[in-house]
Amino acid sequence: MFLLKKSPDLSYQDIMDYVGETTHLGGSKTTKTILKHLVFKNKRPVVLDAGCGTGKTLNILSKEIDCQLFGLDKNRRFISKAKGSVSQLIVGDLTGLPFKDEVFDAVLCEDVLPFVDDVEKCIKEFTRVLKNKGFLAITTSIYFDKPDEQTKEKLSKLYGMKLNLIVFQDFMKLLKRYNVHQVEVVKPDINIIDGLKALHPWSWIKLFSLFLNRNLSRRLFSFLTSWLRMIKTTERNPGYVAVIGKKE
Ligand SMILES: C[S@@+](CC[C@H](N)C(=O)[O-])C[C@H]1O[C@@H](n2cnc3c(N)ncnc32)[C@H](O)[C@@H]1O
């Protein structure tokens, strides 16, 4: 509560820190959509979940495919919560991955890129650690038209941090520059409930307990309405996509 009381407006970042759990838009549905595109030739492929948060994707991967799993996130608290998943967990930064070249058969990165400082450095690192013919699968909000300054400012306020808004054309060029080809762009059939449904019941209790405090409940309500309005009025911009390609 103390953490939340410090800021005049509640942001996505405040709420994620307070609840102590991460999720991504579309929840398990988007991850399963990605998995349909990953056809591995070798037995027990080596897979990295880059920006794994508290391990939602890792848990799905460990149930759906027989693979050697690695999860990496810069947030130590999230990593310690991901411990239930059958994977090797590492605290680290996506812009400097602590792995040798060409060790992974797939790198997944769900709902992380808008939050990193340098998207290009991440793509460079993902492709460095991928084997030739390895899969890169990214889910992200993406802008089909360049966002204006006002939109950028509004979103940064809502999320409580400077966001890297990903522009579709630029992103495709970036992938090509780092030898990611055969790119498929899938628009998963999602709704906001799918992502929220993935939260642990305890997180829901924590979230709803905010409504017991009059001041916090007003701020939470104001955050939720702005967030829903943003999602509703921006069906095209941003769109939400899974981008899947192969390094070659
Ligand atoms: C919206 S959460 C998504 C987490 C997870 N992929 C999921 O689907 O639940 C974004 C995550 O990216 C992590 N992150 C942001 N920037 C990072 C960086 N430069 N290196 C590693 N992790 C980063 C955050 O700590 C957070 O866990």
Image (cartoon, helix red, strand yellow):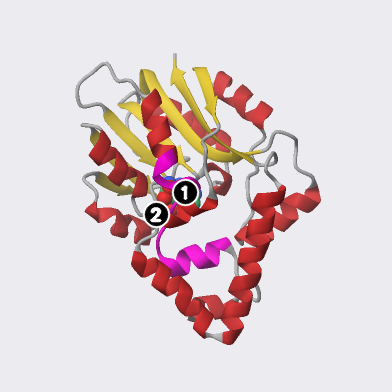
As for residue 118 lying within the magenta part, the answer is no
Residue 46 place in picture, x, y as percent: 27, 29
Instruction: Give the numbered dot on residue 72.
Output: none
At label 1, the amino acid type is His
Which image quarter: residue 236? top right
Q: What residue is pinned by disc 2? A: 198
Residue kind at label 2, given as amino acid type: Ala
Q: What range is drawn magenta here? A: 12-29
Q: Residue, x 38% and y 47% (percent of image)?
A: 52
Could you tell me residue 209's position as x and y percent?
45, 79
Indicate which disc, 2 or 1, sits on the residue closer to the N terminus: 1
Which residue: 63% across, 78% down? 218
Q: Quadrant of the C terminus?
A: top left
Image quadrant of residue 129?
A: top left
Is the CB of the residue bearing disc 1 within 8 angstroms of ligand 1?
yes
What residue is rendered at 58% in x and 79% in y? 217
Q: Which label belongs to residue 24?
A: 1
Q: Nearer the viewer, residue 103 or 105?
A: 105
Coordinates of residue 79 in the picture (x, y in percent): 33, 55
**Spot occupied by residue 178 in the image (x, y as percentages of width and height):** 52, 21
